Amino acid sequence: MSNSAALLNESFGYLVFGIEDGTHAIVGTSFKAKRHKKGNEELEMWLLNRLNNKSLRERLGVDEKNYPLVSVVIKEALAQGLIKIGTPEGTNRRDIAYIPHWG
């Protein structure tokens, strides 16, 4: 999310549950990420484990030839402390995964 915000020249972004699209009326939600699963894995962990340069390019619709754009977003998010590296030291740069700063 912070990467999408950075692409829009915003300092940060929010994921808000319980707000109606269009009207922005507060409607509430019963969604609990820890209660949902993708396969046998909690949805929250499944999402966290799939944040890397390639997945960000796909999510943001950036062509592979423009991969440096996503690298700039990642670098800025790292510099601002919004994300951190979530893979062991020595991992190939193309395979590095990122997690939220609180992860």
Image: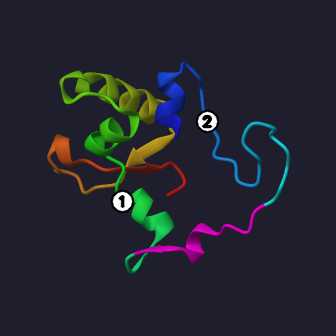
Q: Amino acid at mark 1?
A: Asn
Marks 1/2: CA–CA distance? 20 Å
Identify the residue at image location x=80%, y=40%.
24
Q: Quickly name the residue at label 1.
A: 49
How has the structure been colored for display? rainbow
Q: Is residue 99 left or right of residue 36?
A: left
Image position of 83 with respect to 87: above or below: above
Residue closest to the eye, 33 or 48: 33
| Image location of residue 99, percent across then percent down | 42, 52
Q: Residues within 10 Å of mark 2 (few under 14, many from 20)?
A: few
Mark 1 in CB contact with mark 2 (< 8 angstroms): no
Helix, strand or loop for disc 1: loop
Q: Is residue 29 left or right of residue 33?
A: right
| Image location of residue 56, percent across then percent down | 35, 40
Q: Is residue 77 magenta?
A: no
Helix, strand or loop for disc 2: loop
Q: Is residue 11 left or right of residue 47?
A: right
Q: Earlier in the sequence, mark 1 or mark 2?
A: 2
Instruction: Give the quadrant of residue 63.
Output: top left
Residue closest to the eye, 44 or 103: 44
Q: Amino acid at mark 2?
A: Gly
Magenta residues, start to end = 29-38
Identify the residue at image location x=17%, y=51%.
91
Identify the residue at image location x=60%, y=32%.
12
Q: Residues within 10 Å of mark 1 (few under 14, many from 20)?
A: some
Identify the residue at image location x=81%, y=59%.
28
Q: Is residue 103 left or right of residue 57?
A: right
Image position of 92 with respect to 45: above or below: above
Image position of 76 with respect to 25: above or below: above
| Image location of residue 93, percent across then percent down | 18, 41
| Image location of residue 44, percent across then percent down | 50, 64
Q: Quickly name the residue at label 2.
A: 13
